[in-house]
Image (tube, rainbow, N blue to C red):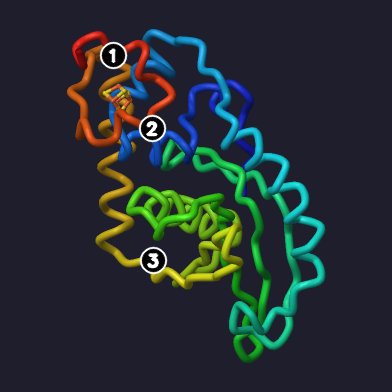
Amino acid sequence: MKPITNDKIADMINVTDIKQYIYCPRIIYYTYVMPVEKKLSFKMEYGKEQHMELDRLEKRRKFVSYGFAEGKRIFHLTVASERLNLLGVIDMVIEAYNGHMKFYYPVEFKNTSGRIQLNHKYQLTAYAMLLEQWSDKPVGNGFIYIIPSKDIYSVAITQNMRDYVKRVIGAIYNIIKSESYPETRSMRCCHDCEYKNYCADLG
Ligand code: SF4
């Protein structure tokens, strides 16, 4: 694959923007159009520490937890696509064999006590799409690892999910280009949002 120039990479959005857009499109405005300072919450700081500890523990986990007899782990793999105008760092990639064929699977670690959210699934889908281009192999599913419970969920990457990710990428670039201030997706998300001090219309 042809290397991507630094100029092109600088113009790309990040996979985490897809997750944020699905949570609330205004976060894209606060990230790219009118950047504001965002304070890391305790939960986020704690999550970072847990991620580091997790890398260490993960090396001891048996691949059978993911449904493979054997495999290899690649941590924090940076992947980018000129076609999607998207880049990201995948928490972990599993390289495993199916018969004589080698396949790759993205794994996303989540520090959440609740169930898997829709935005987590689309974030994983975006990683799978980037991983396909990086590996030149189809990626049929990925995994979400829930840190507190140590549960692992396999997520099928469907065509509908891929199409939705492409539409979200387009919508994110529209906000950036038009510099328009988006409507909130749902006020129910505002309570936990680290940008709530900036949304004056919330009352
Ligand atoms: S506070 Fe509410 S409207 Fe503002 S960015 Fe967060 S979720 Fe969106």
Mark 2 to mark 1 CA distance (whole Å): 13 Å
Q: Quadrant of residue 108?
A: bottom right
What is the crowding at mark 1: few (fewer than 14 residues within 10 Å), some, or many (at least 20)?
Answer: few
Q: Toward which corner of the image does residue 45 lie, by quadrant?
A: top right
Horizontal side of residue 157 vs 174, given as left or right: right
Please tell me whether mark 1 sits on a helix, a strand or a loop.
loop
What label sits on residue 192 in the rendered view?
2
**Mark sitting earlier along the chain (3/2):** 3
13 vs 107: above or below: above
Residue picked out by circle 3: 157
Q: Which mark is residue 199?
A: 1
Left or right side of 184 for 49: right
Kind of residue sitting beneath label 3: Ile
Q: Nearer the viewer, residue 64 or 83?
A: 64
Q: Residue at x 39, y 16 (%)?
A: 30
Residue 57: give x, y in percent of width and height: 78, 63
